Amino acid sequence: MDKRDACIESYSRLKNLKLVGLELGIPWQTVYVHLRAAGVPVTGDKKRYGSDTDRLAAKAEALFAELVPAAVDQNDMQFQAKVDFVVGDYAVDVKCARMRNNRWAFSLKKQELLADFFVCIAYNEDDSYRLMVIPAEVCRFLQTISLAAKTRSKWWDYEIKPEELSEFFDQVRVADKSAA
């Protein structure tokens, strides 16, 4: 097996440039060059190697992928993709937060002009969650959405049951096809 193939095989298991370099006894930069030359996307693995925030985001993205099987995960194709998923012709970014001071805060500032929908997952301390689907049109030019746990804000109007999420995206896709 040549060095490039070894890099590909090792990276497919480890999803970490530094660990592949250590395993093969070469600098991570060389691993990166071999992977790029072979057309292998360098995506990393937030679940294993990310910060607490990265791991929570990975958990939320995995939940969305489970709830919406038609979603195509853009993070599998590119590290830090501009949006997390594409469902039909729609760009969907998944946001998540844990409750702090009786509220959840979701940052939209990097994707507010790119996503068609934001799926916000508000995790409770016991890992239960509430789910919102917010069309981009209603939150354009906002950098943050804040949801209070004990008061009713307009954002709660976009709450959806997990079992309704896939059907929602199916309906949006069908409606767009019939309008065309």
Image (cartoon, rainbow, N blue to C red):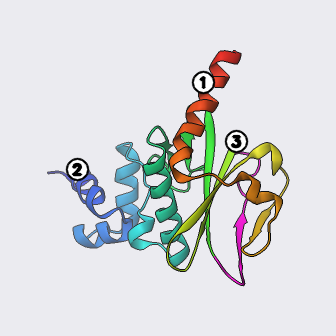
- Check the picture and name the quadrant holding the C terminus: top right
Residue tagged 2: 5
Q: Earlier in the sequence, mark 3 or mark 1?
A: 3
Q: How many marks?
A: 3
Query: Mark 3, mark 1: which one is toward the viewer?
Result: 1
**Neighbours of disc 3 within 10 Å: few (<14), some (14-19), many (20+):** some
Point 72% across, 84% down: residue: 101
**Contact (Cβ within 8 Å) of mark 2 with mark 3:** no
Provide residue 85's location: percent of width, then percent of height: 55, 45
Point 46% across, 37% down: residue: 70
Label 1 amino acid? Answer: Val
Q: Is residue 161 left or right of residue 29?
A: right
Q: In the rendering, which numbered label is found on residue 116?
A: 3
Label 3 amino acid? Answer: Asp
Point 62% across, 46% down: residue: 92
Query: Mark 1, mark 2: which one is toward the viewer?
Result: 1
Would you place residue 94 above or below residue 57 in this image? above
**Neighbours of disc 1 within 10 Å: few (<14), some (14-19), many (20+):** few
Which residue is most to the left? 1
Provide residue 81's location: percent of width, then percent of height: 56, 51
Q: In the rendering, which numbered label is found on residue 174?
A: 1
**Neighbours of disc 2 within 10 Å: few (<14), some (14-19), many (20+):** few
Q: Which residues are magenta?
A: 99-116
Observer able to see residue 117: yes
Would you place residue 170 above or below residue 60 in this image? above
Provide residue 174's location: percent of width, then percent of height: 60, 24
Would you place residue 113 above or below residue 50 in this image? above
Tag 1 secondary structure: helix
